[in-house]
Image (spheres, rainbow, N blue to C red):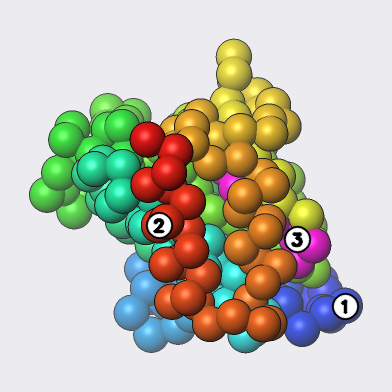
Amino acid sequence: MITISPRSIGEHYTLLQGVKWQTYQLLALDLAETSNQHLTYDRGILEIMTPLPEHERNKRLLGRIVETTTEILGLEVYSLGSTTWSRKDLQRGIEPDECYYITEEATVRGKVNFDLTVDPPPDLAIEIDITSSSLDRLSIYAALGIREVWRFNGKELYIYVLENGSYQDCEQSQVLSVLNKNEIIKILNQRDTMGENALLKQLREWLQNQE
């Protein structure tokens, strides 16, 4: 077992090797209702992440940006938070910080049990990575077919769009094409001087002017 100490106030990681798929599945089920720890599994390697306030405030504000944008644009959204997404055939699994069905919302509306060998994956995942994960989480998202990932490291935002099985770093969201890096970062950078509701009110006004 390797324990990785945090280099910031963002997250704490523990890495376990030689973990069987069945063990990972049982842990994911056991921790789902009793812990805020996030599990990532990649072909026998299990990473356990414990988020701290810096991590949580970033994920929630980014999530609220997504939710506000879909509301103003009149888009339906199915929010599934940090749901575990995994595929036994790939021996991979991950829990995003937030995830959403948007373009595929009608396809999965009301579903609570998912099989990614049959069901479409979420359209958008939010990934906060302040301390830097030991695993290549993007490759897991790509293998599972997540169409777009927003990754924020505390300073910079990356918008990764899946093209031909790999992610391209883009300036503009594809799922929510009205949004780009600059507009999202501008909101994040104002958090210390404005409340979240004031920021989202500003976002609503900006979105309404884009129509």
In the rendered image, residue 61, in percent from the top left (x then y), is placed at 52, 68
The residue at which mark 1 appears reads as 7
In the rendered image, residue 154, in percent from the top left (x then y), is placed at 75, 66
1 and 3 marks in contact (CB < 8 Å): no
Mark 1 closeness class: few <14, some 14–19, many ≥20 residues within 10 Å:
few
Q: Quadrant of residue 75?
A: top left
Location of the N terminus by quadrant is: bottom right
* Cα gap from disc 2 to disc 3, whole angstroms: 25 Å
Q: Which residue type does callout 2 highlight?
A: Arg
Looking at the image, which residue is at 42% across and 67% down? 201
Q: Residue furthest front?
A: 209
| Range covered by the magenta-colored residues | 149-155
* Cα gap from disc 2 to disc 1, whole angstroms: 36 Å
* Mark 2 or mark 3, whichever is nearer to me: 2
Q: Is residue 34 left or right of residue 126?
A: left
Looking at the image, which residue is at 63% across and 76% down? 191
Q: Is residue 159 visible?
A: yes
Q: Residue furthest top?
A: 164
Please report whichever mark, 2 or 1, sits nearer to the chain's N-terminal start: 1
**Is the residue 71 above or below the residue 103 in the image?**
below
2 and 1 marks in contact (CB < 8 Å): no
Report the front residue among 160 and 135.
Answer: 160
Report the front residue among 20 and 160.
Answer: 160
Please report whichever mark, 1 or 3, sits nearer to the chain's N-terminal start: 1
The circle on residue 153 is 3
Q: Which residue type does callout 1 highlight?
A: Arg
Location of the C terminus by quadrant is: top left
The residue at which mark 2 appears reads as 204
